[in-house]
Image (spheres, rainbow, N blue to C red):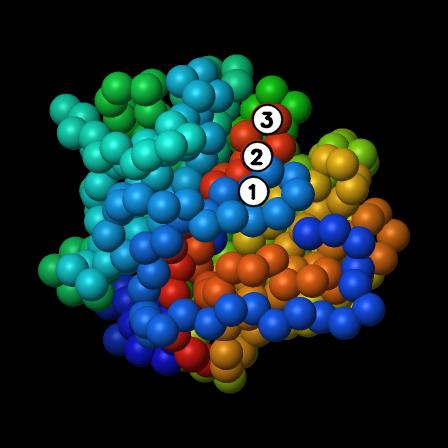
Amino acid sequence: MRTQLKTAWLALLVLLAGCGESPPAIQPSPTSSKTGSLADTWSWNSTGWHRVAGTGPAARYSASLAYDARHNVYLLFGGQTVNGSSDETWTWDGSRWKALSPLHKPPPRRGAAMAYDPAQQVVVLYGGHVPDAAEGHPSADTWTWDGSDWMQADDGPGPRHGPVAVTAQGRAIFFGGNYANTMYYGDAWSFSGKKWIRADAGAQPPGRGNAAAVWDAVDSSLLIYGGTGLNAAGGPGAQGVPLSDTWSLANGSWSALSRSGPGHLSFANAIWDAPGKRAIVLLGMPCPDPSGAAWAWDGKAWSQLANPGIPARWGAALAQAPDGKALLFGGSNEKGC
């Protein structure tokens, strides 16, 4: 990931000068013969991950993926390809990918947050890194998808790269993000359809981008793990540092949880395992090699699981449906840090 992740972070300088019980031994993850951006599709059905055959979007990392519950499809937007940031819109209906050609669409980007808003019955996209004639810039724009077209809405709470989002309790909740290596955010917001509303109050987690986020259905809380935080020794264009802390947002208040778990990890993914009543954090970049591991949080402690069988990667796009099924696409297996 040295080339791709370094490029992704240097681009943030804007003119300032993505199981079962714990086994007795951890199983190795299969490796990929290709190095760089990936274009494989994987599905989760509460018993394990399975590779899905067929063609779809070109290889990319840091794309945005959400489950559109109104139209019963997964929606993918953007991401970083070999040709630059993408403005493509794709859907996955459970059996195949379909490229769409909406009349309107957001500018190309990577690292944007996207989630379905049940109250508005639209998918909401916010932020990300948008290319321009120079190095590109973190954006603050908000877009909604109604199943056939994109519509621009009011700007979000500031320009950010790497915010994350989940769907929970009848709304979409957005967390964190960063502006280059100068400002990292630890706040939570939701979008009402007309304006952005704070979803938290009081003390916040240390700011971060590209965290793993999932809704804990047992505790009715937003669980955040790791991500990329401030690199105090670097300048505005420096790459941030992976974090290793766990935080929970419940009833508008944040709580710090156990620090013992997957270790320093950014660009990871998370799902909710309903049968096991636990959150699972998987893949990501612990530095310098991508991870193929999976860890479970049961509300009290972390435990390492058998590797999910997905080749190691960071920056994959992942979304989960209300029935617990999930879809994962792409990412990158290049080394970095």
Crowding near the residue tagged with mark 1, few <14, some 14–19, many ≥20 C-alpha atoms within 10 Å:
some
| Residue that badge 2 annotates | 325
Q: Quadrant of the N terminus?
A: bottom left
Residue 307 picture quarter: bottom right
Which amino acid lies under the numbered mark 2 shown in the image of this protein? Lys
Front residue of 208 and 260: 260
Q: CA distance from mark 2 to mark 3?
A: 7 Å
- Cβ atoms at labels 2 and 1 below 8 Å apart: yes
Secondary structure of the residue carrying numbered label 1? strand
Q: Position of residue 311 (x, y in %)?
A: 48, 65
Q: Is residue 206 visible?
A: no
Question: Dividing the picture into quarters, in which one does residue 190 lie?
Answer: top right
Badge 2: residue crowd in 10 Å (few <14, some 14–19, many ≥20): some
* Nearer-the-camera pick, 102 or 202: 102
Q: Secondary structure at mark 2?
A: loop
Please tell me the numbered disc located at residue 44.
Answer: 1
| Residue 236 placement, left or right of 280 | left
Q: Residue at x 82, y 49 (%)?
A: 298
Comparing marks 2 and 3, which lies closer to the viewer?
2
- The residue that label 3 is drawn on is 322
Amino acid beneath label 1: Trp
Which one is in front, 227 or 63? 63
Q: Is residue 134 above or below residue 63?
A: below
Task: Give the alpha-carbon distance from disc 1 to disc 3, as whole Å.
Answer: 13 Å
Label 3 CA crowd tier, 10 Å (few <14, some 14–19, many 20+) = few
Residue 108 visible here = yes
Quarter location, residue 17: bottom left
Q: Which mark is residue 302?
A: none
Q: Earlier in the sequence, mark 1 or mark 3?
A: 1
Measuring from the top left, give residue 211's x and y in whole percent.
56, 56
